[in-house]
Image: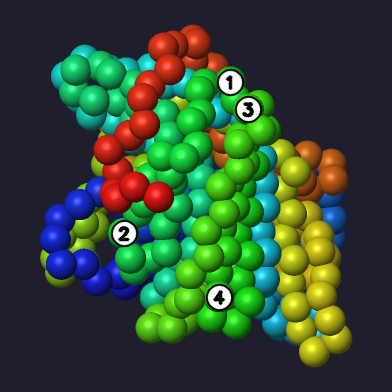
Amino acid sequence: MSLAPRQTSRFRRRVLALAVVVIAVAAVAGVSSAFGNAIRNQASPNWAGWVALPQASSQRLANHFTTVSGSWIQPTGTCPRHRSTFAAFWVGLGGYSLHARALEQIGSEVDCSRTGQLFSYAWYEFVPAGPVTIHAIKIRAGDSVTATVHASSDRVTVIFTNNTTGSTYHHTIVMRDPAPDTSAADWITEAPSNCDGDGHCKPLLLTNFGQIGFTAASATSIGSGGRHTGAIDDPLWNYGEIVLSSNGNLRYSPTEKSYALPSLLNVDGTSFNVRYGPIGPTGPTGPTGVSGPTGPTA
């Protein structure tokens, strides 16, 4: 998929799905609901996780999405020598289609500086605007967090809660140009991108986060017949798995600079894991980083 955001300067950001390529023809195996709703496995240079889309046949209750939510345990990171790395974990609405102009998202991040310092922090972003670090919320490796995005007309609210400390952050904006994109619900691990003033973005090196588990994943859709809430693989939606691969492969290659593989969904469609690299063992518990340098203060 093409990247549409427009920026005026070069900076790091979470962005729309860059060049998601359909590779596998078979439906995703092992999911809990009707297999006919599964879309093809895909590879992306910056996204790994699961995406849900409204079905054309279910528009009465699923014309578009209004809410997406999910929880995870904040992972740590293993920092390489003399290299900066980045990994973002988030839920969001939009950003998936070929002509997407917007993406509303909130999540957490694990970054490594070139000196080996680890940064853990929360953030939100309303693409095409830039990312904002949430300094009001502190997170450490091992904290349980929950993130939600809700859109109603041109108003979008993001909520981030550190369940371990009890801290919660809310923020609402009005999006008009572009309007909010509510055509997809996303549960994603991402390699953030470096973007220039012409909107050309390149994914950065992914932090070795070991493994992360997304849980309590749900979305709410709306249509002329009312609202409907379900898991990732709800029968009213299409849903699919995205593999993060710098080489564009579903299977790991030794030449990959970044690679992250999502698991199958659990039996009720509300949880899955994403692992780093070909094996992706859970990384050792490391020092808790300070709030990261991304964007203005929230």
Q: Look at the numbered disc 4 and give the secondary structure of its residue.
A: strand
Mark closer to the chain start, 2 or 4: 2
User: In the picture provided, is 236 more to the left or to the right than 187?
Assistant: right
Dot 1 amino acid type: Gly
Dot 2: element: loop
Residue 144 sits in quarter: top right
Cα–Cα gap, marks 2 and 1: 27 Å
Asked if the residues shown at circle 4 and circle 3 are in contact, with their CB atoms under 8 angstroms apart, the answer is no
Q: In this figure, which residue is indicated by the disc labeled 4?
A: 155
Q: Which residue position is annotated with label 1? A: 142
Residue at the image point whose x is 29% and y is 49% from the top: 295
- Label 3 environment density (alpha carbons within 10 Å; few <14, some 14–19, many ≥20): some
Residue at mark 3? 165
| Foreground residue among 170 and 84 | 170
The amino acid type, in three-letter code, at marker 3 is: Thr
Q: Amino acid at mark 4?
A: Arg
Query: Which one is closest to the eye, mark 3 or mark 1?
Result: 3
Q: What residue is disc 2 on?
A: 130
Q: CA distance from mark 1 to mark 4?
A: 32 Å
Question: Is disc 3 in contact with disc 1, using a CB cutoff of under 8 Å?
Answer: no
- Report the Cα–Cα distance between label 2 and label 4: 18 Å
Q: Earlier in the sequence, mark 2 or mark 1?
A: 2
